[in-house]
Image (cartoon, rainbow, N blue to C red):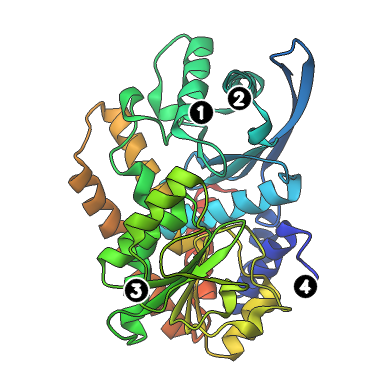
Amino acid sequence: MDNHQADAYANVLTQLTEVKDLINLDENAFRLLSEPQRVLRVALPVRMDDGSMQVFIAYRSQFNDALGPFKGGIRFHPDVNESEVKALSAWMTWKTALLDLPLGGGKGGIIVDTKTLSLGELERLSRAYIRALYKNFGPEIDVPAPDVYTTPQIMAWMLDEYETIVGRHQPGTITGKPLSVGGSASRGPATGRGGALIMKLAAEKLNLPSGATVAIQGFGNVGAEMALAASDLGFKIVAVSDSKMAIYDSNGFDVASLMKLKAETGSLQNFPKSEVVTDILAVDCDILVPAALENAIRSDNYNSIKAKLIVEMANGPVTPEADKLLADQNIIVVPDILANAAGVTVSYLEQVQNASNYYWTEAEVVAKMTELMTRAFDSAWLRRSNLQTTFRNACQVLAVERVVTAMKARGRI
């Protein structure tokens, strides 16, 4: 079993150490980038429907703001913990830097099972998070967004609470909002669409066949939207899974029909002509997409993988130990900080629209996102070739160099 499996932040430090060794990173820079600038922990008292008071523990990690305001999602999940939130804020820092966005990295979370809450309780919890932390948020300070089990509606409640407290409209404080309160066209499917684009660029570099086969672990919003976009690009989606089961069809799925079944029944079960498989990682395919949670691919299960290319749509789905073992087998891993970066890219475009009070069409947003994602891919692929290293290391080197350059310019180093 991997030594780092229980500690997500240990994975961040392992990855950063590899970058340090590759480019002889300044020791002072390494020390500064080894810890978040700030980690906030708060207790949120919430009145429940039955009149009782329940207290929820919540976090916000603000990792680095040398390039711009902290930026990152808020997740509602029972397994949220400080190490995870710190790790996610670090990966967001590298993500925004790799995309060359004028943003830093942050992440937040509340320890909660949203399935146990009524709609009213969920709203009160969302507003309580903002009341506790509003002084730390703002378009020039820290800009939250949706993440696991948070939605545009939750972002709207949070924005309303923030604007009520500060006494003015400030839509750029939170992204991933509904269109009616300053959201951006294409924000919902952005992460999946961007992932499909990056997968296409990587497949072309590796000369994978037209109609390359894809298995997607995790059929939530990101996994489903990526499956749909990838299918439109000519990929064949042969396997998908959710938290309950995995299904396979060698002829490829009609993704729209699969999404319809999932939306109507909450399950992948009983999809026509599909067979249930026990391990989606072991499916015979050209490309594997882990789009669930962290540490899905480890040293104890990596050797079942038959894919030639892995595209990380979840955050941190491959442990550092497994990363090295996959590299030894010449399996290319497109890291999360590039593969799933379209979400924060469109969030940035949402901020720009909020600041100007002028909104683009969906086609305009997609075009801008495509340009930024393609440029980041090309830069990282070139750096991979120059350094003769893994694609993950190349992406992280680019990101860390940009953050360090800004820190030096500010006199922080």
Check whether the beta carbons of the residues at disc 1 and disc 3 lie within 8 A of each other. no
Q: Which mark is residue 2?
A: 4
Q: Which amino acid does label 2 sit on?
A: Leu
Of circles 4 and 3, the one toward us is 3
Q: Which mark is residue 122?
A: 2
Which is nearer the N-term, disc 4 or disc 3?
A: 4
Give the spatial CA distance, label 4 vs label 1. Answer: 35 Å
Horizontal and vertical percent position of residue 335: 51, 68
- Measuring 26% from the left and 26% from the top, which residue is drawn there? 357
Q: Nearer the viewer, residue 74 or 170?
A: 74
For label 4, count other residues whose C-alpha is less than 10 Å away and answer few (under 14), some (14-19) or many (20+). Answer: few
Give the spatial CA distance, label 4 vs label 3. Answer: 32 Å
* Residue 296 can be seen in this image: yes
For residue 125, what is the image quadrant?
top right
Q: Nearer the viewer, residue 76 or 242?
A: 242
| Left or right: 220 as drawn, with respect to 33 | left
From what the image shows, is residue 143 above or below residue 250? above
Give the spatial CA distance, label 1 vs label 3. Answer: 34 Å
For label 3, count other residues whose C-alpha is less than 10 Å away and answer few (under 14), some (14-19) or many (20+). Answer: many
Location of the C terminus (image quadrant):
bottom right
| Left or right: 279 as drawn, with respect to 356 | right
Q: What residue type is labelled 1?
A: Ile
Horizontal and vertical percent position of residue 117: 65, 27
- Under circle 3, the secondary element is strand
